[in-house]
């Protein structure tokens, strides 16, 4: 009878161990990619005062730069959750965009997030010296510079 009770005890402990492993395998695994500076770090960057070099000293260089030479810097951070065999799911995304003017000074700092699959603006700090031209006004201005003699 004593041997039977010890076998039941071992089987019970083995069952609990298997259950613990199964439950641990079902818990989500979080992965973090990229880097976006915190609001506290961004508060050290002054719009209109800081340059690319001082921004790099204060919060570091971004992993992504603008497509065109002289355009802004983009810091991107994504948080992913994976549950067991399912595909990973993005649970949070932060994008910080820092724009620079012609003198390479910070002209705009924006933070975007991901809410219900839509990109939303979380914060924006802008200093402008006048009206910001739209893309359409810039295209029309360029087209207005052509003369009939330029086409001949």
Image: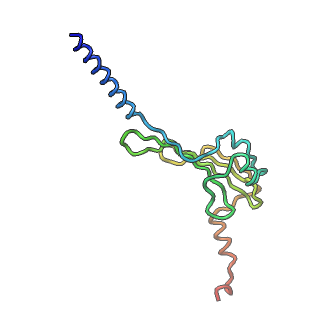
Along the line of sight, the residue nearer the viewer: 10 or 133:
10
Which residue is at 48% across, 46% downward?
117
> Which residue of the protein is positioned furthest toward the top in this rendering?
1
Q: In which quarter of the image is residue 84?
A: top left
Along the line of sight, the residue nearer the viewer: 41 or 123:
41
> Which residue of the protein is positioned furthest toward the left in this rendering?
1
Vertical arrangement, residue 41 with respect to residue 128, above or below = above
Along the line of sight, the residue nearer the viewer: 7 or 116:
7
Which residue is at 43% across, 41% downward?
82
Along the line of sight, the residue nearer the viewer: 98 or 10:
10
Q: Quadrant of residue 144?
A: bottom right
x and y percentages locating residue 61 in the rendered image: 67, 52
Quarter holding the N terminus? top left
The way the protein has been coloured in the rendering is rainbow
Which residue is at 62% across, 66% downward?
136
Image label count:
0
x and y percentages locating residue 44 in the rendered image: 74, 42
Vertical arrangement, residue 131 with respect to residue 91, above or below = below
Q: Left or right: 149 with respect to 115?
A: right
Which residue is at 70% across, 77% downward?
145
x and y percentages locating residue 56 in the rendered image: 71, 51
Vertical arrangement, residue 92 with respect to residue 135, above or below = above
x and y percentages locating residue 49 in the rendered image: 79, 50
> Which residue of the protein is positioned furthest toward the front in this rendering?
3
Quarter holding the C terminus? bottom right
> Which residue of the protein is positioned furthest toward the right in this rendering?
49
């Amino acid at each position: 009878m004593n041997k039977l009770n010890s076998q039941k005890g071992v089987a019970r402990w083995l069952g609990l161990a298997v259950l613990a492993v199964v439950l641990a395998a079902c818990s989500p695994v979080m992965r973090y990619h990229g880097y976006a500076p915190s609001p506290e770090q961004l508060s050290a960057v002054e719009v209109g005062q800081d340059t690319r070099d001082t921004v790099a000293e204060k919060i570091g260089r971004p992993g992504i730069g603008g497509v065109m030479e002289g355009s802004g810097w983009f810091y991107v951070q994504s948080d992913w959750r994976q549950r067991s065999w399912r595909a990973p799911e993005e649970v949070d995304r932060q994008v910080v965009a820092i724009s620079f003017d012609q003198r390479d000074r910070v002209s705009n700092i924006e933070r975007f997030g991901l809410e219900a699959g839509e990109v939303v603006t979380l914060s924006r700090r802008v200093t402008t010296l006048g009206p910001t031209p739209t893309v359409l006004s810039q295209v029309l201005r360029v087209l207005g510079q052509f003369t009939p003699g330029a086409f001949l």
